[in-house]
Image (tube, rainbow, N blue to C red):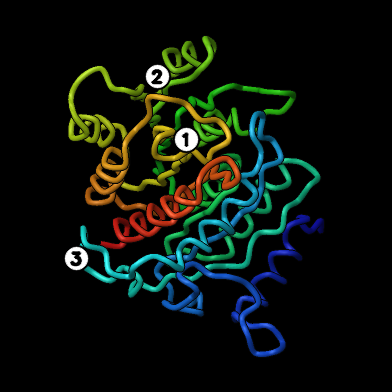
Amino acid sequence: MNVPSWRPWVVKMFENMAGFGGDGHRSWDMFLDGTTTQNSSNAEIVLIPVPYDSTTSYKTGARDGPKAIIAASKQLEDYDLELNRDVSKVGIYTTPEIEVDASGPEAMIERIKGVVDSVGKKPIIGLLGGEHTVTIGAIYALRQRCSDLTVLYLDAHADLRDEYMGTRWGHASVARRINEVCPVTLVGVRSLSVGERHFIEEAEVPTIFWPPGSGNIDDVLNHVLDSLSGNVYISIDLDVFDPSIMAAVGTPEPGGMTWADVTGLVRGVAEQRSVLGFDLVELSPSEGPEASAFTAAKLAYKMIGYVTA
């Protein structure tokens, strides 16, 4: 029997996830410094850092995103004013970083799928990227266990190219690959090719361009909910924000969503749908102020709060 190349590595990773090295101390950094739980078995949220950016086409650096988010998270307050609770009490476990498979994006996607499969069905998984390609692996894993999975995809770009720069598995084709296995709804799009526009129309991909033609975020939420099933995965490319809020991304686009737009939409979906997983991707810390990493960490914590309410 041929053993998938990712499997020995994943087995070793989870053997080490008792949380500590041979000297009795944890051997990797954790979100909130691991103060909520150091045991994956009793965590409601399992965060998976994925420092991968091998198909980026403009500014690189997303590989440093997970480490920056985790470092910034140590400065967060546990109490969330909006939700009026200590979100950390749900139990948040952070795995070691997924080791990059440099043989190509398909191999990396398969490795991520293996890790998500290994986490099990109980916790909600959250990927910290890394480029947007990492999302495909999580979707492939969750789609196997949930036949009616739908994806809410927040991004400044459509990511619907069938192929880009010689690969069908790069960051510009993520939504296209996802749409082949489950429905995807795009929000925040303000940059795309003619071919992608035609695909949206021909394939009837629910898409809310930004800024929306009319209405407020509640109207956007209602349109989004109409397109989603009961089980949802939420993927957020941080370039969906306006660069005045989030400058540290590889492909910034002006005219983006505000903090209230994004959090209002995510909270509204989480209140009315079951969120099985989420990700935050494309933070490139070197491309912007340190505040960007803190904003990303705050958003991750907000999402944890919303999906566990």
Camera-nearest label, 2 or 3 = 3
Gap in Å between the C-alphas at discs 2 and 3?
40 Å
Q: Which residue is mark 2?
A: 204
Q: Where does residue 217 sit, x and y in percent of width and height?
A: 22, 33
Which numbered disc flags the more N-terminal residue, 2 or 3? 3
Q: Which residue is mark 3?
A: 84
The residue under label 3 is which amino acid type?
Asn
Instruction: Locate residue 44: give its quadrant.
Output: bottom left
Q: Element type at marker 1?
A: helix
Q: Residue at x 27, y 69 (%)?
A: 79
Q: Earlier in the sequence, mark 1 or mark 2?
A: 2
Q: Amino acid at mark 2?
A: Glu
Q: Which mark is residue 239?
A: 1
Q: Quadrant of the C terminus?
A: bottom left
Q: Are the residues tagged 3 and 1 within 8 Å (C-beta)?
A: no
* Mark 1 vs mark 2, CA separation in Å: 24 Å
> Residue extending furthest bottom?
24
- Identify the residue shown where x is 61% and y is 22%: 162
Mark 3 lies on a secondary structure that is loop
In the image, what residue occupies the spot 61% across and 76% down? 17
